[in-house]
Structures are given as structure tokens and as C-alpha cells.
Amino acid sequence: MTAETSPAPAQRIAWIDVARGIAITLVVFHHSIQFLDATGWQVDALVQVTAMLSTFRMPLFFLVSGLLASSAIARSSFASLFWKRLALLVYLYALWCVIWWAWFLFVPRPFDPQTSPVGDLATAIYLPWSGLWFLYALILYTVAAWALRRLPRLAQLGLAFAVACLFATGIVTVSSSYTWRSVGTYFALFMTGVVCRQLVEAYARRVTVWWLLGSGAVLAAGTVALPSLPLQGVFRVALCVVGAAFGVSIAVMLARSSVVRRAVGALGSRTLPIYVLNSLLLALAVALLPVELLPGWLATVLLTAVVITLALVIRRAVGSVSGIFTLPAPVQRFAARRLQTDRLETERSR
């Protein structure tokens, strides 16, 4: 077979990194619009555009996250899973909650105080803050997926989609924050990646321009029709699946270009610093920039590019220091010893 119809593992990883690069760029674009809009910039048209992309960017991110976690979830004891994945997520969430809290004591955040992390730091345990809820969601999703792993696959998916629909329709709510609604809704996408990894990879191997156009057309039609549909939350969950499929199609097509694969894939392999830093940098930028210094659309594009670049520069400057974007070195060594012990015990028990 040709490389296009049956890509090697390295190529499959390439499209996954491209997908993550697309998703993180759209996340920063979305946050740029939010911050500019909240400080009086004229970005009304872009607000509508980014709203329409809501069934695309995070569904793609969580689908890919599920794909990457599927092997560890299926094969690991909970102790191994904790030291492989959960320890880092828990540590990063706790660390960056503190950093956010400290940052916004000095830098104004142009949103409703009810959604601001300034306040009781302890609320982060049960109320994920805007911008960091992605890490919080991954912790919950990973634990839930591991707990459900022995159920039949259809049962796992059924439960995940039931949870997603309950949150998306508002039948189940946790506080007034949108973040919990997002956490509940996108569980279905993460579980799709975990449970249906082989199907997603098979789809990626068969993607053509017609699959790209078809999934894009269905997504566009569904987005236009959604406001007039009954049970909007249920249809929104379904539309998120279509959006993720469209995202996979775009990523696969772009990954076939070596130039795009290197550029966007490099971005996709460095999403963590961009994700945790972008809102901090945006808050500082909009506090310093005079309103309407530039046309709103141009300010959005420039802010997106500058913030991503600055986040990568910060990563390059401090990324080698353990404990900022990784576990502290002593904890890493302890985790490595625990994983080695677990492997030896598993081998002896066979």
C-alpha cells in the first residue's frame, strides 16, 4: 500500500501532532477574541465565528487526548496509571492554579468576577477555573476511563454519551460556571478516543478530500441548524463528534505536506505551555494596549501569533527547569522507580 492509504506509525503520530497544533491555535484565537471583546474592542463578527468553532476545537483536542491515553488506560494498574499520567496532571493543575491566582492579583482580568480565579484558592478543587479546566477534565476523564475499562465498549461509550448529553442539555449542572458543563460534555469525545482508537486510526488512513469536504459540510449544516433544533444539547454532542471527525480529516490532509507537518506538528507537540500561559499573557496584553489601536480582526490575529510565540519562548527559557512543565525531578525519579517495580511485579506474576 501507499503511504497515504496506510501510513506508518510515525506518520499517524504526525497527524495527531498536527491536530493538536490546529486545536491549540484555535484555543488561543478564541481566548484572544474573548479578551479583546471584554475590553471594548470591536470584534463582534469574530465572536460569532469562534462560537461556531466551539464544536470543533475542543472536541478535536479531547478526541486526540483520548487516543494518546488509551494504551495506558487499558494496560495499567491504577498505581501505574497514576505515576504515568495522573501525577503530572494533578501537579500541573495545582501549580498553575497558584500561578494564575498570584498573576491575577496584579494583572486585571476583564471578566465577570464570578468566573475569575481571584478569590478562594480552595475552590479550584471542585470548581475548575477558566483556562485550566482542560487539565482538571483530563484528570477526571482518565480516572473514569480506567474505572470503566472492563465494561463492554458499547457500554463505556453509552455511559460517556449519556453523561455528555445530561450536561449539554443542562439536566445536570454543577455551579453556574460554564467549565463544568464543558467538562461533562466533552467526556464523550475523550472516551471515543480511548475506546475507538482503532476506528479513528482506520478513518485517518482512509481520509480523502471527499471525506474532508463531507465532514465539513455536515458540520457547517449542523451548526446553522442547531439553534432551531429541539434537544439542542443532544444534537450539540453529536455535532461535536462530527467536528472532531472534520478536525482529524484536516490534520491528516495537512500532515501529508512535509512543511506543514513540521511546522504545525512542532506546535502540537508543545501545547502545554501555550495552554497554561496564553490567558495570562493575553490579560497583560489587553491591559497595556490602547483600545482600537488596530482593527479588531488584525489585533486578534496578531495577538494569537504573538502569544503563541511568547509561550514557546518562555518554554524554551525555563522548560529545562523541572517542576514548571514537568514533575519536580525528585518526584520524577520516584515515579520511575515505582513504575519499574510495577513492571517487575507484573512480569513475575505471569
Image (cartoon, rainbow, N blue to C red):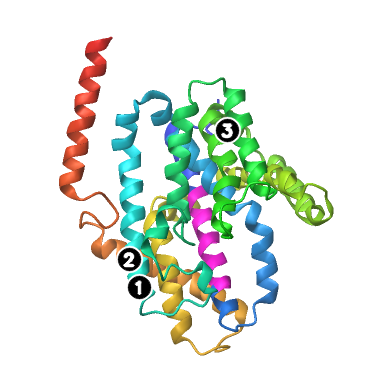
In this view, the residue in front, 346 or 315, is 346
Identify the residue at the far top of this view: 350
The stretch drawn in magenta includes residue 311: no
What numbered label is drawn on residue 316?
none
Residue type, mark 3 in image: Val
Give the quarter of the image for residue 321: bottom left
Q: Do the residues labelled 2 and 1 touch (CB within 8 Å)?
A: yes
What is the magenta range?
19-34
Name the image quarter holding residue 331.
top left
Q: Nearer the observer, disc 3 or disc 2?
A: 2
Amino acid type of the residue that numbered disc 2 sits on in the rendered structure: Ile
Residue 146: percent from the left, percent from the top? 44, 30
- Left/right placement of residue 217 relative to residue 244 reads right
Q: For the residue labelled by badge 1, is the local secondary structure a helix, a strand or a loop?
A: helix
Q: Which residue is drawn at 41% across and 71% down?
A: 118
Q: Position of residue 338 (x, y in %)?
A: 20, 31
- Residue type pointed to by label 1: Trp
Give me the C-alpha separation between circle 3 and circle 2: 36 Å
The one nearer the camera, 346 or 254, is: 346
